[in-house]
Image (cartoon, rainbow, N blue to C red):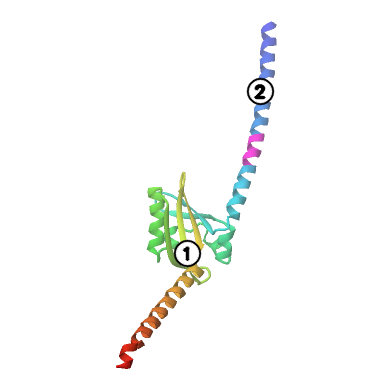
Amino acid sequence: MKKFNNIAWSYEEIQQHSLELEKRVKERTAELKQSEAKMKAQYKGIPVPTYTWQGTKNDIRLVDYNDAAVKISRGGIKKYVGITAKEMYHDNPDILNDLNLCFKKKKTIEREMPYLFKSTGEIKYLAVKYAFVLPDLVLVHTEDITQRKKADENLREANVRLQEADQQTHSNYQHPKKILS
């Protein structure tokens, strides 16, 4: 009879441990969900348009984007979720190459380039950063530098006009001794 009591007691103890483990799992799951929600909110709220691509052996697929990406694309990015990089950038080999290079070499790539937004038809100059994230993601951050590029171009044009005016002034200048002789 004593043996039976020990078995019963062991069963009760196992039940208690099981309940305790289930409680811990529920707590950890709730903490994990809260942490995921916080991370998702941070990602969505990043003020720089950000796109998440997931790589496979054969291709890279757009899996997520943030609120700033929605804004710059005027909502057009939403229809591209699930599309492969080959499909999206079949006409832009530089971007396709950058995505693939970042994914395969697991390295960060930075570039400035004009970009035609398929969703809006607008051309903007972008500073683009591709960053590999373990195990199989590429984050693409884009910064609209169109205004800076226009300001740089305006400054270059102003400098050219200034140099031309300076040359014109020097060519029209006559030394006072030449005027008197």
Q: Residue at x 44, y 77 (%)?
A: 158
Are dots 1 and 2 in contact, CB under 8 Å? no
x and y, in percent, of residue 75 in the image: 58, 65
- The residue identified by callout 2 is 17
The stretch in magenta equals 27-33
Q: Which of the two labelled residues, at mark 1 and mark 2, occupies the earlier sequence position? A: 2
Amino acid type, mark 2? His
Q: CA distance from mark 1 to mark 2?
A: 57 Å
**Residue 3 point in image, percent of width and height:** 66, 7
Identify which residue is drawn at 40% across, 57% down: 98
The magenta stretch spans residue 172: no
Residue 139 coordinates in the image, percent (x, y): 49, 53
Name the element at disc 2. Answer: helix
Residue at point 40%, 65% (across, down): 92
Q: What kind of element bears circle 1?
A: strand
Q: What secondary structure predominates along the stretch shown in magenta?
A: helix
Residue at the spot of label 1:
126
The vertical placement of 11 against 57, above or below, is above
Q: Can I make out residue 92 in this image?
A: yes
Three-letter residue code for mark 1: Leu
Of labels 1 and 2, the one closer to you: 1
